[in-house]
Image (cartoon, rainbow, N blue to C red):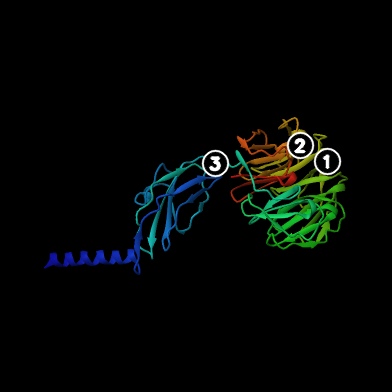
Amino acid sequence: MKAFFVYLLAICTALMLTSCQLGDGGSSAPPPTDVAVVPGDGVVTATWTMSPGVDYWIFYAPASSITTGNWTTLPGAQSHMSISSPYVVTGLVNGTTYSFTIDGRINGGPSGGGSPSVSAVPRLAGATWITGASTGAGDLRGVTYGTTFVAVGANGIVLSSSDGKTWMTQNSGVSTQLNAAVYGGSYLAAGAGGTILTSADAVTWTPQTSGTSNDIYGLAANGSFYVAVGSNGTIITSSGGASWVPASSVPAAPALYGIAYGNGRYVAVGAGGTVLTSADASTWQSVAQLTSNDLKGVAYGNGTFVATGAAGTILTSTDGLTWTLQTSITSNPAINAVIYGTQFVAVGDGGAIFTSADGVDWTAPVSVAPSNGNKLYAIAHGNYGYAAVGSAGTNLTAY
């Protein structure tokens, strides 16, 4: 009799487990057979052919292989449920091998077994560049990323793109040249004659009163606090982007072409090697001049400010106050802009592109699509890669 009750208990337990696995009429589904993974900068994009009604799960780990049976034993393994192709796995470590498998379930049913394990190694973006689709636009002078890329330029051009490759023309409502764009919760574009536009969605743009008729060349954001710089040493600030006021104290300066914020400090750079710095964007001071070359761009990242300019000029600083003149990237083209994403990327005349981990040692990319000698004026980091824009509508991406 005791053996009978043990047998009955085993039967009931098995039925309960089966019920938990199957849910309400759930069943397993065959795993996809065509899973492909493409590495990016700290990410891997997985694609596969989806079947109707199937709920897909992905399992991955920093390992040489993985299955749906062993993934819980692998250090650092994770799973994501209810995913769709393409699926971007983020937060990965560059240079590390990751393996992936995907299974299918129907109505909360059990796993149908995982797809064959596939592997990829995430790597820094910036080594290989491709040409984006023609924008049919004139010169593009500025670019930024919020939830989408926004590029601006000649004749009031405003373009938006989800990936930096295919661009859509938006109505800016102005015909003046736009030189810069930035995102700080809202999109801002600025340019000739003190023009400033704001947009919440990169589609509908509203003109704002800047209080200056000087050309604006550079924008920076610290959250929703914005700073614009331009000709005749112009520096104006705004909380939110709608109402602007001039900085209270600015040393006499020529044109200011670029501005960046980092580590509690603003840095503006400009003509003749000008470098200005401020802790509050209101009171500014000059920094000892190290070059007479025009400085066109500045960025902060990895604990360092990097300024770039004519004749490949490079300046670096850890605090924005004391600067070091580094060996020029190149003796010829001007380097017009620099950004930090997961490394520094600088762009310039003649389609020049260079990358650096520390702002001191620079390397030309392995492969750059032909830019037909066009100038690159601006660069942005976002959506797991970089987008650069320039003259005659030139646009390049690196992922």
Query: SS for tag 1?
Result: helix
Q: Would you say 136 lies left or right of 214 here?
A: left
Tell us which disc is closer to us: 2 or 1: 2
Tag 1: amino acid = Ala
Q: How crowded is mark 1: few (under 14 residues within 10 Å), some or many (20 or more)?
A: many
Q: Where is residue 119 in the image (x, y as percent from the top left)?
A: 44, 43
Asked whether the viewer can see residue 311, the reply is: yes
Circle nearer the N terminus (2, 1) = 1
Disc number for residue 118: none
Tag 2: amino acid = Ala
Asked whether the viewer can see residue 266, the reply is: no
Instruction: Decide which of 120, 241 is in the foreground and name it.
Output: 120
Instruction: Residue lying at the far bottom in this picture: please name it.
Output: 24
Circle nearer the N terminus (1, 3) = 3
Disc number for residue 334: 2
Q: Quadrant of residue 243 in the image?
A: bottom right
Residue under label 1, please give it.
271
> Does residue 326 lie above or below 102 as drawn?
above
Tag 3: amino acid = Arg
> Does residue 379 lie above or below 168 as drawn?
above
Instruction: Residue lying at the far left in this picture: please name it.
Output: 1
